Amino acid sequence: MNLVPCSVVSNREITQGNFLLTLKVPRGFSRPQPGQFVHLRITQDVEPLLRRPYSLEGFVERGKLRAARIYYSVVGRGSRLLSQHQPGAKLDVIGPLGVGFSPRPRRLPILVAGGRGVAPLLFLSRSLRDRKRPFVFLFGARSRRELYGVREIRGGRLHVATDDGSVGFEGSVLELLRQEWREGGHTPLTAEIFTCGPHGLLHEVSDFARENGIRCEASLEGPMACAVGACRGCPVPLLPGADSGRYPAMCVEGPVMDATIVDWARLP
């Protein structure tokens, strides 16, 4: 973990309200693992006071350029200010932070993405492709317009679900997961699940995994004041018996955690 200065290479609006930010980072920024995140200071002004956590969509090393990529939506004051930064703007970043995904050897990774939660799973899919590991990518969104990055998913088997049926399966990505598990001949010893998206989807995927004894990691999202475990502002409630009533900090012991022990009903 390092505090490093960085500069904006590009900040493109991909679809209305959704941006891909590319930040040039110095050598002091360690190569991140898929699932890790950065804590970004949006502005040098007093407001907004707190940094914002963003998961990484990717990391590029090309010649002398080292760049971290962030896919984000404009949802509030901080992200609105971030969307106004032009190439050359200076920012500072703390990171890489947190715990990333940890695929097990000899198991087929099944990636389940919902909406803009696709970002860290795109990063994971590229890592798997680089290691020539097969994978299944299940991507659900409300419509065709929200299928960001779908053309970049290569090296694995891709299935898409949209709520409006504009492309792929019409319905929930959870239904795709159930179908894939049923028809793919997978077992808890041969496959595992990695997921990111809205909490409702993560709750449903974790229930499916727990009921079937499947290893499942989810990337959680939430407000983080310090992102280094000092303020204890992002506790994750666990199911009874999971860890003796302990509340791990999402920023330090996550954001990627064992989805089957998270008490999703009590997670803010």
Image (cartoon, rainbow, N blue to C red):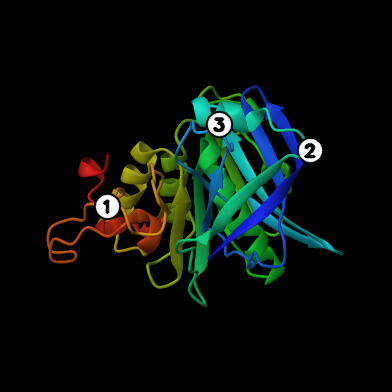
Compared to 157, does 173 lie above or below?
A: above
Give x and y (percent) for residue 74.
Answer: 56, 27
Residue, x 53% and y 22% (percent of image)? 164
Identify residue for label 2.
87
Give x and y (percent) for residue 219.
Answer: 43, 52
Give x and y (percent) for residue 170.
Answer: 52, 29
Q: As rendered, which of 165 and 25 lies closer to the eye? A: 25
Q: Is residue 110 left or right of residue 189?
A: right
Residue, x 55% and y 33% (percent of image)? 45
Note whether residue 167 is visible: no
Nearer the N terminus, badge 2 or badge 3? 3
Compared to 236, does 20 lie above or below?
A: above
| Whole-number angstrom distance, CA of label 2 to CA of label 3 | 16 Å
The disc label shown at residue 18, or none: none
Identify residue for label 3.
79
Amino acid residing under circle 1: Val
Residue, x 40% and y 59% (percent of image)? 228
**Mark 2 residue crowding within 10 angstroms, few (<14) / some (14–19) / many (20+):** some
Amino acid residing under circle 3: Ser
| Whole-number angstrom distance, CA of label 2 to CA of label 1 | 37 Å
At mark 3, the secondary structure is: helix
Compared to 239, does 85 lie above or below?
A: above
